Image (cartoon, rainbow, N blue to C red):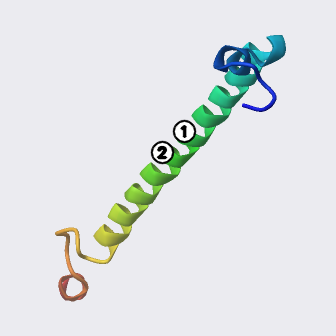
Amino acid sequence: MVQFESWASFFAMGGHGLYVWLAYGATFLVLAISYLSVRGARKRLQQELSWLSGEGGGATQEEETKL
């Protein structure tokens, strides 16, 4: 640690540690929620597309044309 005398002073950040680490935590939380949201939406979309293409156990295109 070149600029800090110890790990404690590194985490304290010259008295601004609370703000700095809360900012890092909030950023990580927003990124994690965003990632999980996109992952869930992608999974739902893939399920919907597989259902629409007939892979989901529904009626196939041939069966639908017979109706």
Q: In which quadrant of the rendered image does the C terminus lie? A: bottom left
- 50 lies left or right of 5: left
Tell me what residue is drawn at x 48 percent, y 45 percent.
Answer: 36
10 Å crowding of disc 2: few (<14), some (14-19), many (20+): few
**SS type, badge 2:** helix
Query: Residue 24's quadrant in the figure?
Result: top right
Tell me what residue is drawn at x 54 percent, y 40 percent.
Answer: 32
Quote the CA–CA distance across marks 2 and 1. 5 Å
- 13 lies left or right of 57: right
Label 2 close to label 1 by CB (< 8 Å):
yes
10 Å crowding of disc 1: few (<14), some (14-19), many (20+): few
Decide which of 55, 14 is in the foreground and name it: 14
**SS type, badge 1:** helix
Decide which of 23, 13 is in the foreground and name it: 13
Examine the rendered structure and indicate whether residue 41 appears above or below residue 46.
Answer: above
**Which amino acid, mark 2?**
Leu
Q: Which residue is mark 1?
A: 33
Q: In which quadrant of the rendered image does the N terminus lie? A: top right
